[in-house]
Image: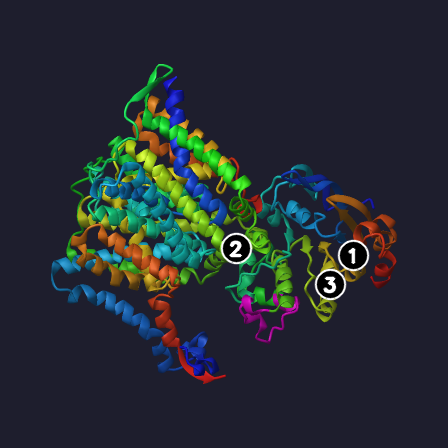
Amino acid sequence: MDILIYGTINSIALALMALGFALVYGISRVPNFAHGAIYVLSGFITWTLLNSFGVPYALSILITMVLIGILGAVLYQFVLIRVRGMAISEIIASYAIGLAILEGLRWGGFKGMSYTLPVFIEGSVIVVGIPVDYQRMVVVGLGILIVVVLWAFTHFTRIGLALRGMAQDERAALMLGIDSDIMALVSMAIGAMLAGLAGAVLLPLGNIVVESGYNVLILAIAVCIVGGLGSWVGAVLAAFLIGFAQILTVVYLGSHYQMVVALLAIILTLILRPSGLFGMQKELEERV
Amino acid sequence: MSEQPILEAREVTKAFGGILALNRVSFDVFPGEILGIIGPNGSGKTTLVNCITSFVKLTSGTIRFKGTDITRKPAHKIADMGITRTFQIMRPYYSLPAYKNLVIPLFSPRAKRTGGWRGGGKLGDRNTVGIDILEEIGFERDSYVPYKMASALPTGYLKRLELARCLALKPELILCDEVFSGLSMSEIASMVPLIERLQMDGITLIMIEHRLRELFRVANRVMVLNFGEKLVEGTPDEVMADKSVKEAYFGSEEVEEVMTYA
Amino acid sequence: MGNGNTEQRRRERLDRGIKVRSDGLYALMSWRELAYLIVPRLVLIVGLLVLPLVMPGAYWQRVITIVCIYALLALSFDFLAHYLGLVCLGGAFFVGVGGYIAAMFNSSLSLPPLLTVPVATILGAVICTLLLLPCLPLRGVYFAIVTLMYPLVLARIIEALDIFGGTDGIMGVDSFANQWLEQYAVISLVLLFLFGTRRLVNVDLGLVFRAVKDNDQAVRASGMNISFYKAIAVFVASAMGCLGGACLVHIYMWAGISLFALDFSILPIAATVIGGAGTLVGPVLGCIILVPISELLREFGTLRIVFYSLILVGFVVFRSEGLMVYGERKYHQFQRWVKV
């Protein structure tokens, strides 16, 4: 039973981490290797606002979201837009930005165990005999909320529909009068905000450490590959697959193997079904 | 025709999502002939080529080449057996000179076995063999053209380069995906004898075309596809006379006018 | 810029006459042409060979050795990225695998460095190639992702399972017999691999590699198994990386998790981009510039990585051609303004 509950929580946490990456790749085909860095950065911004400037917690999270959204947009507008479509440059540029952020944070003194965010609500609740603290309930609730909101956003709003159109075929979308650069900018901002949001709710569960930036990036990528690059539905499903696989390995093999699960998941997917569970890429483009 | 077909396609079906790009298409190709495949845009012609050469996987159906089932073979194995193709959107190696483009197919296991086009089982220097092939296909040997970067070549030469790349493998069957399209009338006029010469050299060809006039001149038989289904198959004259083809291909009204033009 | 005149003028670049003539077989027609071809190469070779002699003190001589090891990594990155289109974000993966193998053979079987280095190179390359095999049939970002993951995951596995010495690493690895041997071994290896890869990309096999990058579908249609050729190239590139790792272990006399450190992944990429991507000489040049700077900045710790990353972003985003491409152009062509 606890496997089920912890598995679900872990899966939703993974989905939160991965959605931003999946969204950006799905819409603008830019693999955002700075994703993990943005996640950690949002934690540190919130921490700084909270502890150095004495901004109330809720407000500081809000400010962080806005700042991170702007950061995403700026990154797109000034860096990624210049290398779009050039696979090698896209990867190198976004990865280098991520590295610069993470290692910059490390150099700036954000290391060690001293950086923690308070949980939103103290205490815990008993779910079918297992104590689950409120923060984890928030994670679950927020995860579900985000999926629902994203779904509604992409199905009922103009911008959302435009984004979906672009995800399907950028050229066709261009011809229909959708400005693909603006849309990619929006997607990048939303993707960054999703990463920031994931950071804000997940980081209170532990310390804020720079290393988690790399972990989050790897997990997000693993989830996206298993789910099929560019597919959000696939990403959510894959999050559950990997989430439960991780909890199972932790229970039966030990916590050291968590990363191995992600790596194995990627490799098995590449061997068995390279397009992932819900891959949008056509066979012709993908398998060479 | 009691002859053993070189290529047999049976009930070939390909679905992209819910759309049937090819629906139970069956046909035979006999050694030494030119089979033309025509059909309106989106009727599944290029998909058929991709299916035969295994660039996409069939949903169902079988394809046999000289009696061997090749349905599930990977693309490079199929090319290795002697089925080559040209691409509708030309795909030269842009960063290499034209003759170096042929070094790549000549490096393949099949070319090493056969010695390349005209080769007697022994492959000489790849650059020389490459230039020989290019000369046969219409690149003037003594000019600068074979040494030009592929990115600087005009369309006509690129189409020939596509064919040359097939020839380097000494193929038995070439699938030509719109070799005439995008060429000027004079370029087509010089391309037709080339195709005829390939046939005389014993190569079987499947030609996918929109230029009906030239196709009907060279093809022995023509198959018509419409919305992924085989409409008719027969000699060019039979196909041209067929009422349903006219309707499918040209729309019902302008049939007479267009056919007199073709 | 901005004044009306520029619109009527444009830059014209012309090949120097000597270049036009000496580009092919005519190189040996005169001493002048011979010199035109050989002098730049000679400058590089002699320069590299002389470097250890002119360096003040053991510290800077050691730096030269490190430069050479990074140069091997940068070569391997450049070769994969610009001749096969495979972006390898994990140079540290090759270094780690090669380094650990060399260290283990040395410490447990007590083989001398002269044996462990070749063994680690070949064996490491085989292991790396096998581990990367699943992503070779695929296009796109998969190779970058998987190579990015391997060093991070391997470091974590070693740490968590406490294998191969765990966090302490493998101590007491033999060093090279003497410093001169060490330096000239790595320098000659760099030269060997530099001219080797330059040759490789121009022979028929190398043309196939370049064709795979240009247009993989057409290579497939020519009856060739792309994954096989990619695997060969990955083998060559990972052999260079593993060789670097193996040498490094013998130089530091220690193998540890820091072999999987980010420096080994990111600095070669930065060096390649700065030196001139796709030239193969450029990356070596980039290392000669970047590594000493990086040594000078040692006290800044991880800020160095920020520094490489930002340089990298700058070079990539502004599509800078890199030093070597610029230099080659200046050497082979002259430029003048012509009225249109």
Task: Report crowding for label 3: few under 14, some 14 to 19, many 20 or more residues within 10 A (C-alpha).
Answer: few
What number is the disc on residue B197? 3
Q: Which residue is tagged 2?
A: A179
Q: Looking at the picture, which amino acid does disc 2 mark? A: Asp
- The image quadrant of residue B214 is bottom right
Q: Between residues B17 and C230, which one lies in front from this camera angle?
A: B17
Please determine if labels 2 and 1 lie on a single subunit. Answer: no
Quarter of the image that includes the N terminus of chain C: bottom left
Q: Which mark is residue B219?
A: 1
| Residue B51 rendering spot, x and y as whole percentages | 65, 45
Cα separation between marks 2 and 3: 51 Å
In the picture, measured across the screen, residue B102 lies left or right of residue A256, that is right
Chain assignment, label 2: A
Residue at the image position 16 percent from the left and 42 percent from the top: C172
Q: Residues within 10 Å of mark 2 (few under 14, many from 20)?
A: some
Q: Residue at x 25, y 47 (%)?
A: A105
- Magenta part of the protein: which range? B134-153
B169 up-or-down from A65: above or below: below
For the view shown, which residue lies furthest in the left direction? Answer: C57
Q: Which mark is residue B58?
A: none
Pair 2/3: label in front: 2
| Alpha carbon separation for disc pair 1 and 3 | 13 Å
Q: Nearer the viewer, mark 2 or mark 1?
A: 2
| Amino acid type assigned to the residue bearing label 1 in the image | Ala
